Image: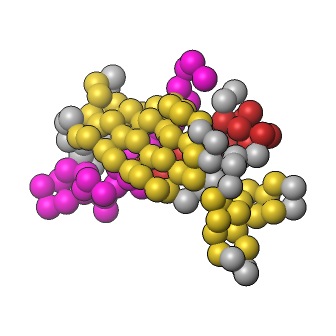
Amino acid sequence: MTEPFRTMRRVEFAETDMAGIAHFSNFFRWMESAEVDFLASRGLNVALESAGRSLGFPRVAASCDFVKPVTFMDVIEIAVRVERVGAKSVTYGFEFKKGGEVVARGRITSVCCLVTAERGIEAIEIPEEIREKLLE
C-alpha cells in the first residue's frame, strides 16, 4: 500500500479537558476508529469470519506521540498505513494532521486470533484472503 488511507473527524467538546485541549486518551480511540474505517474500505472488520471460524484482532501494543494540541471543533485528518503484516500480526501507523500540520503519530499492533467458546482466543496465522486485502 503506497498511499495511506485517510479519514476525517471533528474534535467533540466531550473529548476535551478543562484547558479545552483534546485529552490524550482520545487519540487511541481515534486510531481504532480510523482502523475500522480502513478495514471497511478493504471489505474487512476487526471481527471476521474465515472458513466458518470467528476471528478477531485484539491489540497487543499501542503508542502515540503528541506534537501539537488539538481543540474543540478542530477537524483532523487521520492517515492509516499498514506498516507490517507478519505471520500472525499486523501493525498500523497513524498520522494525525490539522490544517496540513502533523499533530500526532501513533502505532497499533494487533494479532489475528481464533475466537471459540471452549478455548477463548488463540493466536493463529492471518488467513491468506485477509492478508491480501490488508496489502492491497
Quadrant that contains the N terminus:
top right
| Image coordinates for residue 29, horizontal then vertical, percent | 42, 55
**Which residue is most to the bottom?**
118
Quadrant that contains the C terminus:
top right
Q: Is residue 68 left or right of residue 8?
A: left
| Image coordinates for residue 109, horizontal then vertical, percent | 48, 47
Please name the colour scheme applied to the rendered image: secondary structure
Q: Is residue 45 left or right of residue 75?
A: right
Nearest to the observer: residue 133 or residue 37: 133
| Image coordinates for residue 60, horizontal then vertical, percent | 46, 56
Q: Is residue 90 left or right of residue 68?
A: right
What's the magenta region? 1-29
Nearest to the observer: residue 49 or residue 99: 49
Let me know if residue 83 is in the magenta part.
no
Is residue 84 shown to the viewer in this render?
A: yes
Residue at 65%, 75% (x, y): give it: 120
Let me know if residue 5 is in the magenta part.
yes
